[in-house]
Amino acid sequence: MSRLLNNSAEVSPPLDRWNSLAARGVQVDFPFFLAPMVGLSHVALRATARSYTPRGAQNLLFTEMLSSRRLPTERMGDRPETATEPTEINLVPQLLGNEERFIAASMRKLEVMRPAAVDINMGCPVSQALKHNWGVALMGDPTYAEEVVRTTVRLSRWPVSVKLRTGLNDDLEYLLDFCRMLEEAGAAWITLHPRTAGQQRRGAANWDYIGRAREALTIPVVGNGDVQTAQDALSLVRRTGCDGVMIGRAAVARPWVFWQIGEALGLPAPLGREDEQAPADGYAEGREFHRAFERFVDVAEPRFLERDARKRVNFFLHWGARWLDFGHELWRRASSAPDMTETRSRVEAFFTKPQRMTARTVLRG
């Protein structure tokens, strides 16, 4: 796989920095990742995304962020946030926290997930995270952030990565110094979403900052932000030289984006789709969204309690429908269904007519 990827006519991420992590259990030869997203990056979405990964490829799949204060007191797998499948590999739980006693207890709890690595959230900009000095708030105090990373690295059996934003302010030199500190503190790689905390998802992600961070470090740098299509992902690699690309809500709408990227790089189709090509136009993507929905529900329905399954299915449709021409109607019908059987029926009826998916949409809320 590595040879195929490096010899592709398309520009693909370099693998040398990932190869240096192989001895530590991080096996990556297809560095395009599903992002950790609250309410979304659970076992059903991960399974759906995995079904579209090129056959034989190895990437990483992230959980949604897990609170280090809540994790120690719960039974793993009871909530959708901590549910896994026995066949899941290369799983990276994302941890939200800053206190040693909670981080230590969380590490013990994460054993059951058999993680490949653990990710520290330094990017969440919501008020609750800021109030507790979690998430992107840590970027306002480099000394404290360094302590959190060093503590987590010391307590973890697995490599530790960090997902971060530009910071509380748009200051490139501060960002680069912060990234160097993360590497010196033991971070195995970083994922950079180059927006400030105040931007949320507004404005444009400054991809140039990803390239500058990559030049400043020797560990892998994964780029994140404003990637809605396969070509966006490949453009990010071309423009920045980054070691990987993380895709968020666009991968909820089109989880087959990993198939599209692989196809562009000359990689095999996903298992079970060997004689097919990835969806290449809006109507083909509309048809594939229906298929992805069925895959998603097939995992969610038996794995979660009814109320949890409905909540996750509706959230999947809430985001995915934003790329469909008449997605608001799909969302209206599905969200008012009284049970999962009726949800399936209403979605099936919606897709009896051809539906078109747009390449991009606005993601502000």
Image (cartoon, rainbow, N blue to C red):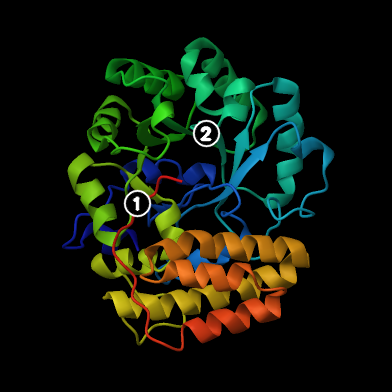
Give the residue drawn at x 62%, y 73%: 297
Measured in 3D between alpha carbons, the distance from the residue under mark 2 to the one under mark 1, in whole angstroms, is 20 Å
Q: Is residue 46 visible?
A: no
Residue 362, x across and y down, in percent: 34, 51
SS class, disc 1: loop
- Name the residue located 40 percent from the left edge and 57 percent from the top edge: 250
Q: Which residue is mark 1?
A: 362
Mark 1 Cα-neighbour bin, 10 Å: few <14, some 14–19, many ≥20: few
Q: Amino acid at mark 1?
A: Val
Q: Position of residue 174 (x, y in %)?
A: 34, 15
Question: On the image, numbered disc 2 is attached to which residue?
Answer: 124
- The residue at the point 24 percent across, 67 percent down is 264
The quadrant the N terminus occupies is bottom left
User: What's the mark number on residue 264?
Assistant: none
Q: Amino acid at mark 2?
A: Cys
Picture coordinates of residue 176, whole percent (x, y)? 32, 21
Horizontally, is 160 left or right of 173 in the view?
A: right
* Residue 23 image point, x, y percent: 49, 44
